[in-house]
Every structure is written in structure tokens, then in C-alpha cells.
Amino acid sequence: MATFLATYDFLLVSMVLAAALALTLYLPLMAGQLSVASPGFYALGGYTAAILSTKVFHHPAPGLYPVSLVLVEIVVAAVVSGVLGLAVGIPALRLRGIFLALATIAFVQILGVVALNLDVTGGAIGIFGIPQPFSSQMQYMWLAIPLLVVSMLFVARLEPTRAGRALVALREDELAAAAMGVNPTYHKVLAFTASAVLAGAVGAISAHFINTWNSRQGTFDTSVNLMAFVLVGGSRTFVGPVVGGLVLTALPEALRGIAGLGGLPTWFAEFLRDGRLIIFGVLIAVGTIFFPQGLITPALLRRLAGRRRPAAR
Amino acid sequence: MSDLLAVDDVTCSFGGVTAVSAVSFVVTRGELFGLIGPNGAGKTTLFNIVTGLTAPNTGHLRYRGEDITGLPPHRVAERGIARTFQNVRLFGELTALENVMIARHVRTRSGLISGVLGLAGSRREERDTHERAAALLALVGLADRAEERARNFAYGDQRRLEIARALALEPELLLLDEPAAGMNTGEKRALSELIRDVRARLGLTILLIEHHVPLVMDLCDRIAVLNFGQLIALGPPGEVQTHPAVVEAYLGDSV
Amino acid sequence: MSRTLLLQQVLNGLAIGSVYAIFALGYTLIFSVLRIINFTHGAIFTLGAYATYVLTGSQLGINGLLAGATLPIRLPFVLALLGGSVVAAICAVIVERLAFRPLRMVGADPLLTLVSSLGVAVALVNITQYLFGAEPYSYPDPLSRLPSAVNFGSASQPVLVRTVQVVIFGVSMVMLGLLSYLMNATRTGKALRAVAEDITTSSLLGIDTDRLILLTFVISGFLGGVTGTLIGLSVGIAGPYFGIAFGLKGLAVIVLGGLGDIPGAVVGGLVIGLAEAFVPSQYIAYREAVPFALLFIVLLARPQGLLGRAQVQKV
């Protein structure tokens, strides 16, 4: 067990962070909005933490970087992302459907170019040597798991409340929801901003976790990963994206392991591990046709729970 | 102020087609006001204008004396105007109860944070919302199906559910767009009763679009007739029934 | 700014722009008929470029599964171009059959189709990368016998545009003409526009919608292949991901011009090309952000684009 954890510590923490990031796609989706803007806020959060820890907070080396400062960075990253989320969301969320998706794609691309060219973000090289608050990678779970749990609790608590119902109504029928008194733009911006805050927090942790941060973090590829997590995992319940994030992050590595055991040629096994984007891309295409609501649906959860859908409290 | 809603010289065109043309009328408080006319006469468009889904090109709407022209739909709903839709627009994936609960939105206040944190005020409001929604379902006779998904309801029941949802807004003015469509005679009778009951019990003013003319003649205090976007007659049922312009517009229909 | 410099920048802009324009033509053609954004256009474009490369008998690089391989045949460039574009067209059809048609059959939301096309595009590009490696390739030069640049200025104040760029501009105009002719003046075009308007009714009226949609993808794929090869000729193939980069920029082009509008694709392309050319030199690093900034602004200010009609929402 200990060797397993030691070998796979990077993967396990990555899985938890991916699950949290998947929720950032889920939040706007609750209101029926497909926004792929979270990679941008993820990148922003990472840069915030990277810049703060390498250029602002001076800590005496050697020795571990204080965890309290990491927590500060997470909060700052979350706030910065939230503010940008509001600034971008208020105009952008008047857009519907494809137009919103395109606007969020544009947003991520613009941020990427800006990050590539500013001095403070280290330009093309990025920022490296980000200080470590822990002596082993596994200890990042102290940050990752609480973040995931808190976000899951937030979303779970959101669904049966007035605000959550408003979001779901918007997803079902925006026009009817508005006619019933739900302010569409306000609620869409709310979901979008919450999503940005979470993405920023994940980014901040990730920057320390990966030790370097550059414009290759939080790109179009990340959007594709997130879409795979949500589409395959399940888009109608918060459990879906979490499971999608956990499983799909582990999948390529797991496939490589299985292929190795089965005595398949190494190149095939390597392909399974390195071809994650090919696998995710195909899963997305297959998913839209065969299980557009994802594998984990509310119906499935009800059946697993063995009872009918409980009345809203 | 006895005039609840004033439609003042409203015109609306879409890409060359004039859907509503210089229509003016007034609905007084407590009235059951009917809106009839052949298909495409502009009735639903008029509803859309009143509820803010569409903006008129010219003209004004006054509700309780306030100019509400151009307000977005949720603001119109806030002010106490609720509606049902010609093609039922329920939240299909949600249960009947949830559909009605959503419409309590403007009458409740708990925000995102208090809801997520489960603060006392928010919990109280949740219970209240739940109870009121259940009561409204009982009013329209759907209490035993509160937990069923709205899309599984039969057409006639869906229409009743939509009415319950609209009532959850606690409106003063209720707009019903062809509520009897797809109902058989018995259901139509029950609906008539329901509308009368609701109006009396809740003190509502009701604006009703309907194709089934006997229903309209039976229920309404006054009727406005639209044809090709224009108001061609306005008055009590008896008067409208024999109005020459109306008879001509309805050639072929049983008036 | 001197007149020569201005002219040079305008011509640079048009050169860049016409590259975007031919890419966008195939892109917007699909939208004009099916009302979907087919992001795989970028991947098809990549496949076409690589197919042409292989067909010229050139050798593959050291990365990728097919490292060092060459095809036993060696075609002259123009034939390789045609061959590569045919390969691209075939791939487009396969994508249509496997990914888009099932969605169309169930009346899926265009948003779902966009998501699917994103997945397919990324998968295809990564497969290409897996096979061919990510290193740059360039074609054996077919234009070596022509002068390398055309001078639009004078001998003393030269305003140069590379010959290949002039060729590309010419191709974009020819393509625009052909497509416009097809859509507006032929029976097939009329049928295509009927399908765009209402696919169910068209089918009920006896129009073979399946065959027409197939035709649309064949044309779009072929165009994509031609575009990929021409761009590869002009700036070299930087790696399979240049298809994704174009796919993304192409979104800006077609939205700016007006989704589904064929002349709009060319107008959008030229406008963005000119905008990029006129970025002041101190901001040259941000040039790549220009198309996306324009996309964002257009979406907010005028989502129907320059040539599109405002869409009225039916309630």
C-alpha cells in the first residue's frame, strides 16, 4: 500500500484537483450555460500563487514554505479570479448557447497570449521554482481534498435551495424561468463567478504542486479535458463531474498498467498512457451520441440509493 | 385605480410582418377579460408584449399606473403579472412540486449564501415555499402527483400544472394562453370552474386567450377580438358575438 | 506613414487574410447548410496538409510512429495537392457519418455537436501527431521556377508580396466565386439552401438531404485539404496543432463575417488579416490575441457579424 501511494502520489493528487476543476464546468452548466472559461481562471489562479510566492512573499530558504502563506495565496487567487469572472461574466452571459461558448473560448485564448508576453508572468518560460510547502507530493492532499469536499458540499447544498432551483429552471427553459420571475443574467453570472473562484483556487494549489507555471497550463486542451470529465461523468448531478475527473485522470495510467499486465506491446501501452487526448476526444464524441447526460445520472443515483427521489426539503 | 392594465396603441412587427397593430384596451381590476381571434391574429404576441418577452415597436403598457413597457420578463413577474404559455413550457425534468416552487422565487428572498449555509431564515422560507406549492397543487387537483416528473403528465394535466405554477407568483393579473387546448369536454368544464374559483378566491384579474369560443363566451365579462393584429371588436360577449366584423373574421368557425 | 509602407502593410494584411479566408470558407459552408460549427475542419485541414506531404514522396521525420517512412510513389506537387485534398474530403465524410449524423438523427442541440466536434478534432490532431510527430515539415518547392516575390511598388521603393501569397489570394477569390456560384445559381445550391432552412421539410419535399449533406462535407473537406496544403506551402507545417490554432482563429473569422455567410467568410478573413497586419510594432507580441479580442467584441456588439442578418428569436 505504501509503495502504491508513493508511486502514484502525483497521480492521486492530480485526480482530486481534476475533480475539483470539473466542478467549475458543472456550475455554469447547472444554469444551462456551456462555458469553457475555467482554464483561464485556473491559469490566472496559478500565476497569482506563483507570482506571490516567488516574487512577493520572501521566505528564508531552505525549509518549507509556510502553508499559511499558501492559504493566503489561495484566497487571493480566488478573489482575483472572482473579480475577473464578474467583469467578464456580466457582459458575456447575455450571450446564449454557442455564442457564449465561443466567447469563453476567445477569453481563454486572449489570456493565454497575455500570459505569454508579460514580464511578471515570466513570458514564454513562465515561473519556475515555486516553493514547496510540503516535503512530499502526497501531502498536497491536505489542500486538495478539503477544497474538493468544500466545493462538493457547496454544490450539493445549492441544488435544493431557491438559488439552485433558479439555476435549474434556467437550464430547463430560460424563457419560462424569466416569466416566473427568475433574473437570468444575475443567476448566470452568479454561477459563472462561483466557477471562476473555484478554478482560481485550484490553480493556486496546482502551481505549488507542479512547481512551475507557464502558458501551457490552462489552455484549450484543458477545456477539452473538462468537457470529457463532465460529458462522460455526468452533467446532471455534481457527482458526475467529480467521478469523471477522478476516473478519467486515472484512466490512461490504469490502461497502461492493464496493457502491461496483459503482455501487450510496450508501444501500445505507452500509447494508452500518452494518448490521453485521443482517448478523451473519442470519449467526448461517443458520449454525445450514446450518453449525452453522462454515465452518472440522477436516475442512476436514485436507483443506487434504493429509494424514490426525496421531496425537496 | 380600477384600471389594472392599460394597453396603449401598441404596435409590434417582426421582419416585415405586423403582428400587433395599434391595439388599445383597458382591463379593469377583477375582470375576466377574453382575447379571441383567428390563428395568427396576434394574441400570443400581445401576451408576450405584456409580459416583457417581446418589446413593442411603438405604444405603451401601463400596469397599476406604472409604465412597464420594455421591462424584462422577470421584472414584469415581480410586479405581479403571471402567465401560462400556448405551448406548455413546464420544466420537464423537474417534479410538479419543484415546478411550482420555482415560481415562488419573487416572493422569497433567501440568497445563495444563506441557502447554502442553511441559515434559519432560509430554512423557514424553504418550508413555506414547500407548503404553498403543495397547497397550489391541491387547488388544481394534482396534489397526489407532486413528485412526478412534469414531462410525464398528460397534456390536460400539464396545463393545470402550469396554472398552479403561475399562481405561485401570487399575481394580481393572470394571463392564460389557450388553457383549454387539448382538453376534452369534461376537462374544459372543470377548467372553467377552476378559473372562476381561482378568480373569486384569490381576487385575480384574468386575461384569457382561448379558441374554444363557448368557453370564452361563458366565462368572460368582456371580450376583445383581434384579426391580423388589429382590434376589431371589444365588449360584452353578447355584443361581440353578433358584431359584423367578428362574424366575418370567423367565417367557417362556429360562433 | 509613408505610402509605400501603408501599401506594404495592406498587402500583408490581405495576404494573411486570404489564408484565413479560404480556411473559413469550408468552415462557414458547413454552418450555412447544417447550422453547426464543425471544429473538425481544422483537423481535416491538418490531415490534408500531411497527406499531400506524404504524397509528394517526402520522408517523414524522426518522431512519431511512422518515423522515417516514405511512400513508394512520388507525385508532382499539384497532383499531390489534389490527392491530399481528396484524402481530406474522405476523412470529412467519415467524420460526418460517424460523429455528426447520429447527432442529427436525434435532433441534438448544435451545442452538443460543437462539443463533439471539439473532441473529434483534438483526437484527430493527436492521432496525426502520434503518427507523424510534432516536428515541422515543409514541402518541396513547386514554385521554384517563378520569382519568389511580386513587386507591387517600384524598383526604388519595393512593395513585395511573396508569390505563394499571391497564389493563395487568387485561390481564395476563385473559391469564393465558385462557392457563391454554387449556392446561388445552381439547382444544387438551391437545394442546399432549402436544407439549411428546414431539413425535415426539404426531406419531405423529396430532396435527398443525406446526399446533399455528404456533398457539403466533401466540398468542405476538399477545401480544407487545399487550404492546409497551401498554408503549409506558405509558412511550412509547424506541427499538427496548427490545425487547432487555425480552427480557433477560424471561429473568429466566421463569426466576424457572419456565421454561414460565404462572402462573409472572406470579408471576415481579410478584416482580421488587416487587423493583424496593422498592429503597432510595440504590441507585436499580442498579435495572436487580436482575432480573439475581435471575436469577443463582435459577439457582444453584433453577434450576427458584419454580413449576417440579426436573428429574431421565436417565442
Image (cartoon, rainbow, N blue to C red):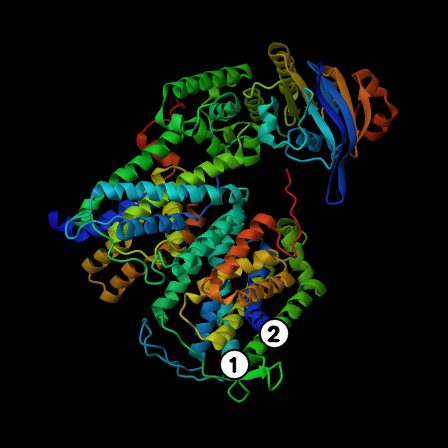
The amino acid on which the numbered mark 2 sits, given as a three-letter code, is Ser
The amino acid on which the numbered mark 1 sits, given as a three-letter code, is Leu
Q: Could you confirm whether marks 2 and 1 are on the same chain?
A: yes
B7 or C57: nearer the eye? B7
Residue at image coords 52%, 61%: C250
Residue at image coords 21%, 43%: A67
Q: Secondary structure at mark 1?
A: helix
Q: Tell me: residue C5, above or below residue B206.
A: below
User: Residue A216 appears in which quarter of the rendering?
Assistant: bottom left
As drawn, is A299 to the left or to the right of C199? Answer: left
Do tag 2 and tag 1 residues touch (Cβ < 8 Å)? no
Measured as percent of width and height from the top left, residue C292 is found at 50, 57
As drawn, is A271 to the left or to the right of C82? Answer: left
For label 1, the crowd category at 10 Å Cα-Cα, with few meaning under 14, some 14 to 19 and many 20 or more, is: some
Q: Which mark is residue C2?
A: 2
For label 2, the crowd category at 10 Å Cα-Cα, with few meaning under 14, some 14 to 19 and many 20 or more, is: few
User: Residue A161 appears in which quarter of the rendering?
Assistant: top left
Q: Tell me: residue C180, above or below residue B26.
A: below
Pointer 1 indicates a residue of which chain?
Answer: C
Measured as percent of width and height from the top left, residue C145 is found at 53, 89
Residue at image coords 36%, 54%: A280
Mark 2 or 1 closer to N-term?
2
Q: Secondary structure at mark 2?
A: loop
| Front: mark 2 or 1 | 2
Measured as percent of width and height from the top left, residue B84 is found at 61, 26
A45 or A102: nearer the eye? A45
In the displayed orientation, state which residue is furthest to the bottom.
C145
In the displayed orientation, state which residue is furthest to the left.
A2
Q: Tell me: residue B133, above or below residue C167.
A: above
Q: What residue is pinned by disc 1?
A: C79
Asked whether residue A294 is in view, the answer is: no
